[in-house]
Amino acid sequence: MNGSGLPENIPPHAEPASGGGVLSWIDRRLPVISAFRKEYVDFPMPRNLNALWNFGAILCAVLVLMLATGIFLAMNYTPTAAGAFMSIEMIERQLPGGWALRAMHVTGASLFMAALYIHLFRGLYYGSYKQPREILWLSGLGLLVMVMVTAFAGYVLPWGQMSYWGADVAGKAVGAVPVIGPTLEHIMEGSDQLGDIFIHRFFVLHFVMAFAIVAIVGLHVAALHVPGPNNPTGKPVNARDTVPFHPYYTTKDLTGLVVFALVFAALAFLWPDLLSEPENYRPANPLHTPADIEPEWYFLPFYGMLQSVPSKFGGLLAAGGSIAILFAVPWLDRSPIRSARSRPLCRAGMAGLVVAFVLMGLVGRHHAEGGWMIVGRIATLYYFSYFLVLLPLCARREMRGTAG
């Protein structure tokens, strides 16, 4: 026995917390409460975080909303070619509160992607991908891919005109892959034509991926809490420059959530047509092709890339490569300087990257016709040049500067 009354093989810091009550009793046997307090109440946070750091909490809140509304929608959805569209109509017109559930789910999908893009931009701008946060960056990109797959599967499920023809375009793009393309297309569609098998597979994919995303979010948060959050300066902070997560950042996050909720409510209940495609209010008709086939707005930049490259396979490589290249950013940018605030050339390049991304979306909207084709190719070239040329050159120059 030692002086604290514990067996000698138990260190003093492992002594159970004293005190009464049910929570103390649980915590002495399973220290989840003390662990939660350590990681989400007393956790030290840099005091200089700006509003861009609100989007992590916003994404978590919207994810919970999407899961809750999605479960209730799934209970009333029929994953068949004959019943999918009618089940959506029944949810919106006959199920009590069904219209609100679907409005929140559809709006949540769009705003989740918007918040995710802002979250990604913040990581790029402030160098949150640099050592020792590589796992944080990679897990976040894994989440981006999973969310995009889930969003596309969800877009297909209403089985309206845009859902059907969007799936048809995606299937033909996959089929353009040399050698294995036809096999991949058959695996994706399940038969020679889009129908029951395809809808059922994408319904299962959409449902399962949603819960897989929750698991990876847990990994992402754990990867954040090991090195701690980055900050706008990109420089390590000492204990004097930190504040506990609660109440300082809980109130800040709640303020951001309130503002976000107002935007969410306005789009969901006042201007729902801004985020919906009128053509998708018609049931899928394989014999009638819509005049303008285009995906949801958050896929338009990649659709623009797909159309700007002359060959289907080349366009698929460009669209897929635009995501894949982000996984290599921690090794493409080896500069000791993190934040673009202290990197004028990189900051200008980031502004150009945002402009290129928006232009690619406009190209997708206008189907890369006429002058938009040239704009799309220039924007695509700049997008890849930023990561493959500008970032490494900036890093090399800054490494020489710090060495000198």
Image (cartoon, rainbow, N blue to C red):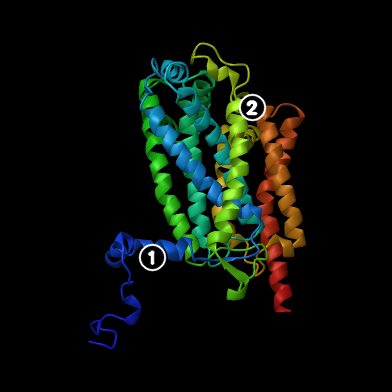
Residue nearest the observer in this picture, 234 or 188: 234
Which residue is depicted at the point 47% across and 60% down?
40
**Residue pictured at 59% horizontal, 18% vertical:** 278
In the displayed structure, 269 sits above or below 232; it is above
**What amino acid is found at the position of numbered circle 1 in the picture?**
Ser
Secondary structure at numbered mark 2: helix
Nearer mark to the viewer, of 1 and 2? 1
Residue 115, by quadrant, is top right
Percent x, y for residue 64?
Answer: 45, 42
Pointer 1: residues within 10 angstroms few (<14), some, or many (20+)? some
Residue under pointer 1? 34
Q: Is residue 133 depicted above or below 352 in this figure?
A: below
Question: Is 254 left, or right, of 96 in this rendering?
Answer: right
Q: Quadrant of the N terminus?
A: bottom left
Report whether residue 180 is seen.
no
Q: Closer to the N terminus: mark 1 or mark 2? A: 1
* Residue projecting furthest to the top: 287
The disc labelled 2 sits on which kind of residue?
Leu
Q: Where residue 90 sits in the image (x, y, percent)?
A: 43, 17
- Count all numbered tags in the image, as a single digit: 2
Q: On the rendered structure, is 37 left or right of 45?
A: left
- The local secondary structure at tag 1 comes to helix
Q: Residue at x 49, y 66 (%)?
A: 42
Q: Is residue 108 above or below residue 227?
A: above
User: Mark 2 sits on what residue?
Assistant: 274
Distance from Cα at disc 1 to Cα at disc 2: 45 Å
